[in-house]
Image (cartoon, rainbow, N blue to C red):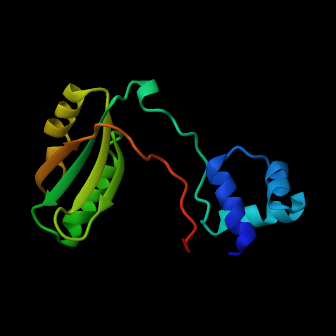
Amino acid sequence: MDAIDRKILALLQMDGRLTVTELATRVGLSVSPCHRRLRELERTGVIRGYRALVDPTAVGLTFQALVFVTMRQEDRATLLGFEAAVAAVPQVVQAQRLFGDPDYLLRVVTADLAAYQRLEDDVLSALPGVQRLNSTLVMKQVVDDRPLPHPRG
């Protein structure tokens, strides 16, 4: 990956709807070599896809919680079962396995506190292997969906 590839990535993270022609102009290439570079970034998985960033509040999802999950046991079958089950919960918009305690961090969005309470009681607490859930409510998004930084600084 060279400086031009990094510039392509930076531009697309800011505006994923750029046409190949616009992208080529901004990185200083003709359309054909820019298109080849773009396809290679997609083929190798550097670019994983394209999507719209939707404002959760605008679609009625005004409540967010960070949920720390401690597992009862950490054998492979339990962890894989938990991960498959949590991946099927649409309100979990991000899930990360952590080193140490707690074992997982989930970012959850719901319409309101009551909807979150029902989700925690009926779904999250029943996920395979869960020993304890500890929730922290999000007061305000300060940084969200920021483009990735350059790896060297």
The answer to whether residue 116 of the structure is visible from this angle is yes
Q: Would residue 76 be found to the left or right of residue 131 on screen?
A: right
Report the side of 96 relative to 115 (left or right).
Answer: right
Residue 116 in percent (x, y) is at 22, 33
| Residue shown at 13% from the left, 37% from the top | 121
Measured from the top left, where is residue 64 in percent x and y? 30, 37
The image shows residue 138 at horizontal and vertical percentages of 28, 40
| Residue 31 against residue 45 in the figure, above or below | above
Does residue 1 sit above or below 109 in this rendering? Answer: below
Q: Residue at x 71, y 63 (%)?
A: 7
- Between residue 116 and residue 143, name the one nearer to us: 143
Whether 10 is drawn above or below 123: the answer is below
Point out residue 46 in the picture as x, y percentages from the top left corner: 60, 66
Task: Tell me which corner region of the image, top left, top right, bottom left or bottom right, holds residue 76.
Answer: bottom left
The quarter of the image holding the N terminus is bottom right
**Nearer-the-camera pick, 126 or 64:** 64
The image quadrant that residue 48 belongs to is bottom right
Q: For residue 5, which quarter of the picture?
A: bottom right
What residue is rendered at 11% in x and 67% in y?
73
Counting every numbered tag in the picture gives: 0
Assign the C terminus to one quadrant of the image.
bottom right
The residue positioned 27% from the left and 64% from the top of the image is 80
